[in-house]
Amino acid sequence: MKVKAAAEGGKSRSDFLFEIGCEEIPAGMILKASRELKALLQKHFLANGLLDEKFAETSIETFGAPRHLVAIARGVRMRQEDVTREITGPPKSVAYDQVGEPTRAAMSFAEKQGIPVSKLNIVNTPKGEYLCAKQLVIGRPAVQILGEALPQVIQEISWPRSMYWTGAHGPRFIRPIRWIVALLDGKVIPFSFAGVQAGSHTYGHRFLGKSQIKVASFVDYEKKLRANGVIVRPEERREKIARELAAHAKRSGSHAHEERAHQGPTMPARTQDEIREDDSYRNGKN
């Protein structure tokens, strides 16, 4: 079978935002889960032709925080490319008799492909001349494909242990899922997982932020979460913690020891909210 891509029309690519919102994930599991999320999305995007293979690694970014597993993908195809499939059938010598009339082999092949015998073609192959049927397969919309793939992605993230909350035979995850954000080109990708319907609303910090925050893109998402006490990028959280520790050490005349071993699982799990609470505690406000 040969596949030939057809030209795309209309708006061909856009950006994707995905967030799994759940109860607090143990700190040591967040980094591994965000890496797995990237690998799983990359697998599904490539398998369905929604990203170019040479750009897939750099197109997808994932982040993790205690209640947020987040992914963004740039340049996602809005629909699969149309493809022309060439399906090879029986040899010409078997498909036609001595006077050129189609045999039962040719008619059976045409019936199987859903076309009349007159639409069959002859192609040259290294083994000789063979019958060939050409079929145009229309690409599916990315929203439809992702609506099927994203529940699988959530289910495929592996955990040292997991729990169920909708019944013993229901889906499992590290902690109960409370909300899901799934947007392509700013529009909701409809699907549900464990009774939670995907939408366009995220949640800020449990105590310092708002709930039901509507978002339209990753830029909008990041900005609004920051205003509601959550920094989604681990590097930014780490830098903020380091700055505040250094400032506190300077004010108090103490010395902050750098603990590199904690910068993997522990540091990325911290949010702006927790930093504020720590500041309040250190300043004697609690």
Image (cartoon, grey):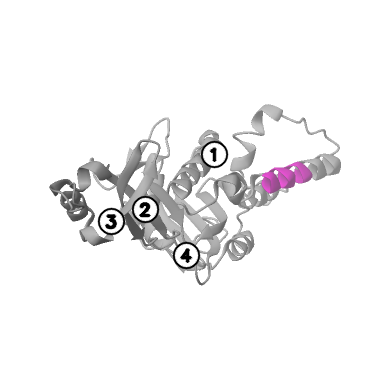
* Disc 3 to disc 4: CB gap under 8 Å: no
Q: Is residue 30 magenta?
A: no
Q: Residues within 10 Å of mark 4 (few under 14, many from 20)?
A: some
Start-end of magenta stretch: 235-244
User: To which residue does mark 1 refer?
Assistant: 35
Residue corresponding to mark 2: 85
Percent x, y for residue 15? 55, 61
Q: Residue at x 37, y 53 (%)?
A: 85
Q: Secondary structure at mark 2?
A: strand
Quote the CA–CA distance across marks 2 and 4: 41 Å
Magenta segment: does it hold 236?
yes
Residue 83 percent location from the top left of the image: 41, 57
4 vs 1, front mark: 1
In the rendered image, the vertical position of residue 33 relative to residue 15, given as above or below: above
Q: Earlier in the sequence, mark 3 or mark 4?
A: 3
Mark 1 and mark 3: Cα distance apart in space: 48 Å
Identify the disc placed on residue 120: 3
Q: Secondary structure at mark 3?
A: loop
Which residue is the site of mark 4?
A: 201
Q: Residue at x 35, y 59 (%)?
A: 137
Callout 3 amino acid: Leu
Q: Number of callouts in the render?
A: 4
**Numbered mark located on residue 121 in the image:** none
Precedes in sequence: disc 3 or disc 2: 2
Q: Is residue 130 left or right of residue 103?
A: right
**Residue 12 position within the rendered picture, expressed as x and y whole percent measured from the top left:** 53, 65
Q: Quadrant of the N terminus?
A: top left
Question: Does the residue at mark 2 contact the one at mark 1 (Cβ under 8 Å)?
Answer: no
Q: Earlier in the sequence, mark 2 or mark 4?
A: 2
Asked if residue 115 shows in the view, the reply is no
